[in-house]
Image (cartoon, grey):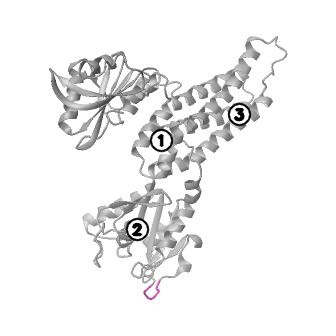
Amino acid sequence: MNDTICAIATSQGVGAIAIIRVSGDESISIVNKIFKGKNLEKVDSHTINYGHIINNNEIIDEVLVTIMKAPKTFTAEDTVEINTHGGIAPTNKVLELLLENGCRLAEPGEFTKRAFLNGRIDLLEAEAVMDMINAKTDSQRKMAANQIEGKTSNLINELRNDMVQIISNINVNIDYPEYDDVEIITQDILKPKISNLKEKINKILKESENGKIIKDGIKTSIIGRPNVGKSSLLNTLLEEDKAIVTDIAGTTRDIVEGQIKINGIILNMIDTAGIRETEDKIEALGVEKSKKIMDESDLILFMLNNNEELTDDIRELLTKINDKKYLVIINKNDLDSKLNRNELNVEKEKIVEISLLENRGVEELKQKISELFNMEEIETKDPTYLSNTRSISILRKCLNRVEDIEKSIKNNIPIDMIELDIKNIWEELGTINGSSYEEELLDEMFSRFCLGK
């Protein structure tokens, strides 16, 4: 990190302004070489300076240059931001001059990576920077803001602090047994401490289910036989004609996708091929794909036709959704009923009666979805959760190890051996916020960031 990096921090294209960011020990002196105006090496930190970018006395662009001196910058290094006019040619020319005068083009996410390596932010806060950039809903924005402020990191720090107290106490017992004023850690004393740790981890994991919903949305599949109204439901929810709707059975042979928002939460909607026995090879592939998507979904909207009797294949599929989050939607209530509701082996409160032709029941369906995922509570609650798969996976692994420690206590395993297990969990938790990390993890994670961030 001894070199000086630069990159265009704004989207490429025509706009009012573009920002080129420079960071490193030589950032001010390099920019000063191509700047006509005040001597940037002598101006105060955190000032904006008017002038021109020049090349061999030719004016390239009229600019505003912001000087920010270490350590009070995003990267904790000397940083310069050049505001140019937002055309492609002037922006690229300024970047070219910076490279010619000693800068290196930054890798994706390298500015944020430097902020982490320089201790300016931790790993959770770094990941939240990209979440903020990608935020599509207000709930996603709020959650990312809380992570950037360090509120989520505090959850992990509290767990690690609890464990440090246990570890240090055991170490004192082992190394300085003559200290009478230090509590002697026995299995009976350790047991409630570990139970409390387990309870805290469980609480974070449970609440982080909401975080994953906010960040990734709810994968929602619309399942049912041909011509029950799956494509019509998708179009109604999306308020656009995304899926082709005809009276011909088997029109939808592949998945059709779209997104809707309910109470600030994104539903990733998937309209699937109608499920039925068929000799058409292409349609059969679509049916198998539908069943696979149903298994992978967070929410299943299982559609039935009010004007059609229940078939054996649908009865079988209905038995498979009870362990998932689902709603059974009975469509075509404008027609005579041939469907026996008593044959449905599902919870009655999860049945929604609708008529897409008469536009009845759609709002009730949205309300049911909201209640199923407690969306109103998620929207109003301060969202301080773990939200990325990496962190949640590590925390689940830690929970399993805590449960192993509970078994060790029950089996009277010596305290000094249990202390090693506790220390391993403490180190594992450190990989969540970057207190400990592997270089390969950083390279992989920051490579997913946009250039200039």
Q: Which residues are magenta?
A: 334-338
Residue for badge 3: 194
Which of discs 3 and 1 lies nearer the camera? The answer is 1
- Label 2 crowd bin: few (<14), some (14–19), many (20+), radius 10 Å: some
* Front one among 39 and 177: 39
Instruction: Name which of mark 3 and mark 1 comes first in the sequence.
Output: 3
Q: Position of residue 427 (x, y in %)?
A: 57, 25
The residue that disc 1 covers is 389
Mark 2 → mark 1, Cα distance in angstroms? 28 Å
Comes first in the chain, label 2 or label 3 = 3
Of mark 2 and mark 1, the one earlier in the sequence is 2
Q: Indicate left or right for 121 with 28 as reference.
A: right
Dominant secondary structure of the magenta stretch?
loop
Q: How would you rate the neighbour count of disc 1 (Cα within 10 Å): few for under 14, some for 14-19, many for 20 or more?
A: few
| Labels 3 and 1 touching (C-beta < 8 A) | no
| Dot 3 amino acid type | Ile
Amino acid type of the residue tagged 1 in the rendering: Thr
Residue 288 image offset from top left, x and y in percent: 35, 61
Q: Specify the quadrant that holds the N terminus.
A: top left
Q: Is residue 330 left or right of residue 271?
A: right
**Is residue 160 shown to the viewer in this render?**
yes
Image quadrant where residue 160 sits:
top right
**Mark 3 Cα shell of 10 Å, populated few (<14), some (14-19), many (≥20):** many
**Does the stretch in magenta take in 337?**
yes
Tell me the quadrant of the picture where the C terminus can be found.
top left
Is residue 251 shown above or below 102? Answer: below
Q: Amino acid at mark 2?
A: Leu
Say which mark, if any, is on residue 237: 2
Residue 114 falls within the magenta-colored stretch: no
